[in-house]
Image (cartoon, helix red, strand yellow):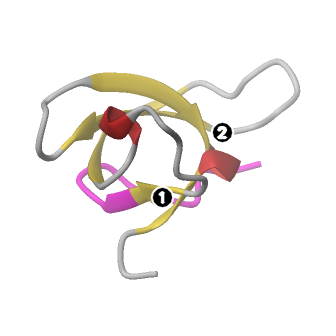
Amino acid sequence: MAHRFHVHQLVRMRVLLLDKSRNGIHQIVRLLPLAMDGTPLYRIKSATEGTERVVTEDEIVPASH
């Protein structure tokens, strides 16, 4: 499975959580190798807080949605 998103693309977390650092706009900073189950992984950075995390493709949607 190929990565659907690209570096520098703006995304949002699919599910909003109590952890406010996960909400809002994030930028994809790196495409990571596929997970063991073939799911694409991404390193994203919060646009407001600067925190980075690794997420699976099914956890994010384009920011325009």
Q: Tag 2 or tag 1, which sits nearer the N-term?
A: 1
Q: In this view, does 21 lie to the left or right of 57?
A: left
Please identify the quarter of the rendering in which residue 48 is found: top left
Contact, CB < 8 Å: mark 1 with mark 2? Answer: yes
Magenta stretch bounds: 1-11
Magenta stretch, main secondary structure class: loop
Cα separation, mark 1 vs mark 2, equals: 9 Å
Q: In this view, does 8 lie to the left or right of 3?
A: left
Q: Residues within 10 Å of mark 1 (few under 14, many from 20)?
A: some
- At horizontal 39% and vertical 55% (from top left) the residue drawn is 6
- At horizontal 77% and vertical 48% (from top left) the residue drawn is 1
The answer to whether one can see residue 23 in this image is yes
Q: Height in image: 25 above or below 55?
A: below
Residue carrying label 1 = 5
Q: Residue 24: image x %, image y %?
A: 30, 55
Q: Height in image: 55 above or below 36?
A: below
Q: Height in image: 56 above or below 35?
A: below
Which of 42/50 is in front?
A: 50
Which of 50/28 is in front?
A: 50
The magenta stretch spans residue 65: no
Mark 2 residue element: loop
Mark on residue 51? none
Which of 38/52 is in front?
A: 52
Q: Residue 50: image x %, image y %?
A: 13, 30
Q: How crowded is mark 2: few (under 14 residues within 10 Å), some or many (20 or more)?
A: many
Mark on residue 40? 2
Please identify the quarter of the rendering in which residue 62 is found: bottom left
Q: Which amino acid does label 1 sit on?
A: Phe
The magenta stretch spans residue 2: yes
The answer to whether one can see residue 30 in this image is no
Q: Which residue lies furthest to the top in this view?
A: 36
Q: What residue type is labelled 2?
A: Pro
